[in-house]
Image (cartoon, rainbow, N blue to C red):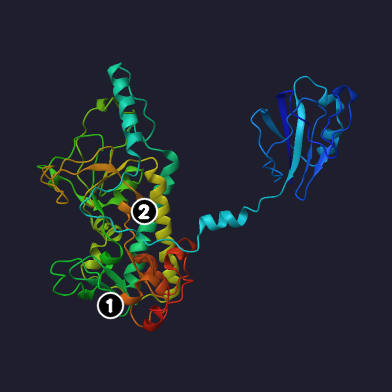
Amino acid sequence: MAVTVIVASSFPSSQHLISTSSSSCPHRASKARTPLLQSSRGSIATSSSSSFVGEKLFLAGGVNQSRRECSLWRNLIFVPPKAVSELSDSEAFLDSPTGEVVGYAFSEPRHTSAARKYDRHPQNVDLPPVLSKKKKKPYSIPIHKVLRSARIDKKLAHMGVEKHLEPPKNGLLVPELIPVAYQTLESWKVLIEGLAQLLTVVPVYGCRECPEVYVGSTGHLIQDCSGPQNVKRRSRHVWVRGTINDVLIPTEAYHLFDPFGHRIKHETRFNYERIPAVVELCIQAGVELPQYPSRRRSIPVRMLGKKVIDRGGFVEEPKPCRSQDAMALLSEIDTYAVLNGQFMSPPADTRKAAERTLKAYSTVRSGVRQLMKKYTVKACGYCSEVHVGPWGHNAKLCGAFKHQWRDGKHGWQDATIDEVIPPNFVWHLKDPQGPPPSGALKRFYGKAPAVVEVCVQAGAEIPDAYRPMMRLDIVVPEAEEAKLVA
C-alpha cells in the first residue's frame, strides 16, 4: 500500500480548506493539527493554510471530489504508510516556505500479475490474416522512421561526415552472437532430421493447385482453394501426399563471400549458390563452413551516406571445398536429401522425437530473431524472395504484382521473422482421428504452424505461445448445433 502526498506551491485566497467539521479554516499561525477526510478507501490530510483550494480528485486513494481550475500542483511524493503519522504531525514541514502538504490518500495494491499473464498468453487470438497479392506487404519499420533516417544520412553526407557504423553494420562480427549462430545452425539440423522422421508417422497432405496444407489422415473439407480453375471445382482442394517442404517452407538466399563486395546482377546470378536463408544468416554471423567460405574483416568498412568509400579492396573468392564430408554436411542443412528419396526410419520413441523437434524449432526462431536484431536481412515487399546482406540484389526475378512496372526488380524492405521462417499455418483439430474439418464449422477451429501441428499430433505437449491461436477452449458443435450458435 502506498500513500500519495500532494504538495502545492501557490494557492488563491478565495477558496476554503477541506475540513471534517466546518468550512472555516484556522489561521496558519495557530499551527493546528492536520484535519483528515475519512472515506471507505482512504484518508486525505490537509494543511492548515487558510488560502488553499482543498477540493481535488485523488486518483491514488480513489476519493472522488470535484476539480477546480485555480489549484497549482507542483509534484507528487509517495511515502510509506509508516511515515504518514509523522508527516501529518510535522509542523516544521507545514511551516516550510518551499511547500505545504495538501493531502495524502492510501492507494490500494494493484493486482497486475493476472493482467500481465493475460497479456502474455491471452485466451484466444485472431487467426493470421491472409495478405492480398495485389498489394505490397506492410513495412516492418514505420516508413516515417525510414525516411527520417535517410534524411539524416543525406545531411551528414552533404556535410562530408562519415556515417558512424557499429558491428556488424561495418563488416565486423559481433562476438556475443557467434555462439547464438552456432546453436541456431545445430538446432536447424535437428529440426530437419526430426521432421523427416516424424513425417513417416504423421500424415501430411497438400493441395496440388494451391499452397494449402493439412496435417491429418485425410484432407479437410473446407472449400477455400484459390488455385487455377477453382470455380469449376467449387473451391475444393485436390489433395496429394505432402513432403517436408510443405511443412518447413524452404526460403533460400544467395550465398555471398563478401556482403559488402560486388552486388549480384541479373547476368551474374548463376555464379552464386543458393542455400537456406537461416544457414546464410548463421554464416554471416560467424559460423565457419568450408563449403561456404566467408570473408572476415579486421578493419571496419567506411561509408559516406549510401556510398562505401573504404571496403578494404576486393578479394577473390576461394573455391569451396567439395570433399565427401562436405557433401554429407550439405545434406544436413538442407531438405534436399529428404526430397531426394533418402530412406528415413521411424523414430524409436515418437513422443521424445516430437519434443526434441519442437524444442529445436523454438530455438531456431529465437536464434534467428536475435541475429536479425543486428544483422540486416532484406525481403521483397511483393514476393517471397529473401536476401541476407546490407542491401538487396539486382536479379530481375520478381513476378508478383505489377512486376512489369519495376522491370522484374524486387521491392526490398526490412524482413521479419515470418519471412525468413514462414510458419505456414494449418487448421488444428483436437481429435486427429475424428472427422475432418468442414466449412460449416470453420469459425470454431483454430490454427497452428505446420511444424507445431506435426509435433503435437506426434505426442508433444502444446506450447503456451500457440494455445490462444489453437482455440483449445472452444467446443466444436455438431453441424445442426452450429445453426443455433449466435
**Which residue is nearer to you in this view: 443 or 313?**
443
Residue 96 spot, x, y in % from top left: 80, 21
Residue 273 spot, x, y in % from top left: 19, 49
Image quarter of residue 319: top left
Q: Amino acid at mark 2?
A: Leu
Note whether residue 434 is visible: no
Q: Which type of secondary structure does the marked residue at label 1 adopt?
A: loop
Q: How many numbered callouts?
A: 2
Q: Amino acid at mark 1?
A: Leu
Write down the residue under mark 1: 221
Report whether 360 appears left or right of 3. Answer: left
Which tag, 2 or 1, sits closer to the chain's start?
A: 2
* Residue pictured at 25% horizontal, 34% vertical: 260
* Residue pictured at 34% horizontal, 25% vertical: 152
- 64 vs 199: above or below: above
Q: Which mark is residue 185?
A: 2
- 136 vs 308: above or below: below
